Amino acid sequence: MLWQIIFLAAGILSLIYYSAICIALKKWDSTFSRFWLAAGIVGIAGSVLIRLYGMPCVVEALIGIAVCLLLIAEIKIITGMCRRPLEKRPEEDTRSGTRWIIVLGAQVRGRKITDSLKRRLDSALEYLKEHPDVHVIVSGGQGNDEEVTEAYAMAQYLERAGIDCRRIIQEDASVNTLENLKFSRKLIADVDTPVGIVSNNFHVYRGCVYAKRAGFKNPFPIAAGCHPLLFPNYFVRECFAVWKLWLKKC
């Protein structure tokens, strides 16, 4: 009986959340939102099947394993989100050479900056104004439905906000997070210099891991916010991305 209630409640809540995402984004087929539609259907169907046939032990075990893996990924993501956005160390303030931050790209609709990307750029903008000696790499190529590269759109946004174009370098060939960091690494001579990784809060853990894999010795997170309604959607999606990250390391 308990499992039946759990499946039914999870299914109904998933469908409600899917509807809320559709209303917020004004589209029904955004990439990960369909996960909640599928979860809603599975939850309600599972509730009916449990009522008819009961709950097999093997299914309970699989659910337990999945929940444990999900919690491990969530803890890692939350730990990354809670790290200090700036790690100031006296030796870094006096060392020679330019320090850098890297803004990881996100979708551009035509030429328009999306909400997630705007939040990243606003966090980068705040950091750049507080640290006039820091340069920024805006990293992101051009998708099929984008009129310009993400790097170009980001550079234009920062320039309009008052950042000197000489402080901005565009990396416009990457198509994913790992490439963002690998290609940006080629633009920085000293990998020992502190490098800030700018992304939305749910994404900074993976961004810093990829930065280390790309060769940066001292990456630190600069976490931007996220649309409150969409945070659960991005957070769960990021768990799957973290699993993929770990599996690629194996």
Image (tube, rainbow, N blue to C red):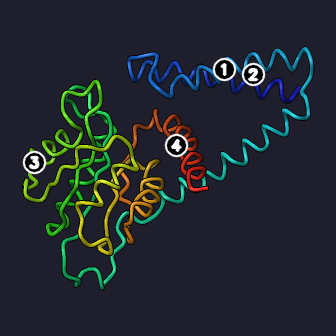
> Which residue was labeled with disc 3?
159
In the picture, the disc for residue 238 is 4
Ranked by sequence position, the earlier of labels 1 and 4 is 1
Whether residue 23 sits left or right of residue 34 in the image: it is: left
Q: Secondary structure at mark 2?
A: helix
Ranked by sequence position, the earlier of labels 4 and 3 is 3
> Which residue was labeled with disc 1?
12
Ranked by sequence position, the earlier of labels 2 and 4 is 2
Separation of marks 2 and 4 at Cα, in angstroms? 25 Å
**Amino acid at the residue labelled 1:** Ile
Whether residue 250 sits left or right of residue 134 in the image: it is: right
Q: Give residue 204's position: percent from left, percent from top.
A: 43, 54
Asked if residue 51 is positioned above or below residue 152 in the image, the reply reads: above
Q: Secondary structure at mark 1?
A: helix
Q: Secondary structure at mark 3?
A: helix
Camera-nearest label, 1 or 4: 4
Q: How many marks?
A: 4
The reply to whether dot 2 and dot 1 touch (C-beta < 8 Å) is: yes
**Amino acid at the residue labelled 4:** Glu
> Which residue was labeled with disc 2?
8
Separation of marks 1 and 4 at Cα, in angstroms? 23 Å
Q: Residues within 10 Å of mark 1 (few under 14, many from 20)?
A: some
Q: Secondary structure at mark 4?
A: helix
Quarter holding the N terminus? top right
In the picture, the disc for residue 206 is none
**Amino acid at the residue labelled 2:** Leu
Q: Give residue 85's position: percent from left, percent from top.
A: 37, 63
The residue nearer to you, when weighing 152 against 204, is: 152
| Quarter assignment of residue 93 | bottom left
**Amino acid at the residue labelled 3:** Glu
Asked if residue 171 is positioned above or below residue 9 in the image, the reply reads: below
The residue nearer to you, when weighing 187 against 233, is: 187
